[in-house]
Amino acid sequence: MLSDPTFILVAVFAVLITGLAKGGFGGLGLFAVPILSLSISPVQAAGIMLPILIVMDWIGVWAYRKHWDKRLLLLMLPGALIGIALGGLLAGRVSEDFVRLCVGLIAVTFPIYAILGARLRTGVDRLKNNRPVAWVASTVAGFTSFVAHAGGPPYQAYALAQGLDKRIYAGTAVMFFSVLNAVKLVPYAMLGQFDRTNLMTSAALIPLCPIGVLLGVWLIKRIDQAVFYRIMYGLIFITGVKLLWNVAV
């Protein structure tokens, strides 16, 4: 893979976008697996990205080690672990096209959710401290996180309604997904996603992690975020449509 110029270009872009997400452009991390899935298997794409995400998690955990909500984390982790288990059980029994279909649907629906989220979250008071909703949201977050490292939207749908201070909210999200990514190491290893090729590819891309994060920190102060998000959401949507088209034909 590292000898393929097209893959290298796509992979560098995917890692930098993930770094931008960690550097302040939350939500864009979902882009990595869909865009990599245009050139390689979505299962392999997720396997390559997981060590990279874990390295980025270490930075986030250190930065937010004193700013997170223990109650919310403990409430949502059990459902998330169930979602990861479901993803692991299904992954060995379904085709790559089915996984590609799931990734494509996530990539298509996320921009719609991001744009309409404010309207969809009317009546958020009913979500506050609602344990059944927390379990549903976290289970979906665990499953989509397993499939495509895309647990952000279902997590946000519940967590945003809790009215946390923005720093506590960000720190809790960092801790939540750090735990999920660490847990995913086990089923990913069982699925053979940490072979020599994938690990060498991850290792080659890891040096881009701090560059992406610092670029995000730098850009967030200098560009029109609304315009940037519209462009990126458009690209995510187009990528999802292309993946769905590939499955259909």
Image (cartoon, helix red, strand yellow):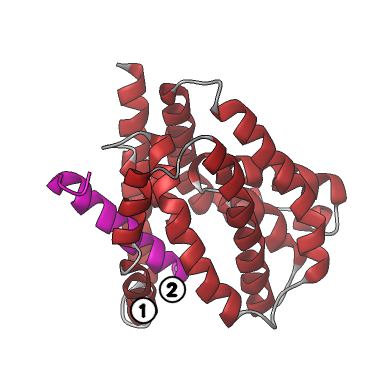
Work out which residue is located at the far top of the displayed protein and give it: 249
The residue closer to the viewer here, 139 or 183, is: 183
Q: Is residue 243 visible?
A: yes
At 51% from the left and 48% from the top, the residue drawn is 149
Q: Residue 71, position in %: x, y?
A: 83, 66
**Which stretch appears magenta?**
1-26
Q: Is residue 23 left or right of residue 129?
A: left
Q: CA distance from mark 2 to mark 1?
A: 6 Å
At 38% from the left and 70% from the top, the residue drawn is 225
Report the number of discs.
2
Residue 220 painted magenta: no
Residue 25 painted magenta: yes
Residue 217 location, quadrant: bottom left
**What amino acid is found at the position of numbered circle 2 in the picture?**
Gly
* Secondary structure of residue under mark 2: loop
- Residue occupied by mark 2: 23
Q: Residue 219, position in %: x, y?
A: 33, 77
Verify CB contact (< 8 Å) between mark 2 and mark 1.
yes
Q: Is residue 109 left or right of residue 167?
A: left
Which secondary structure type mostly characterizes the magenta part of the structure? helix
Q: What's the mark number on residue 214?
A: 1
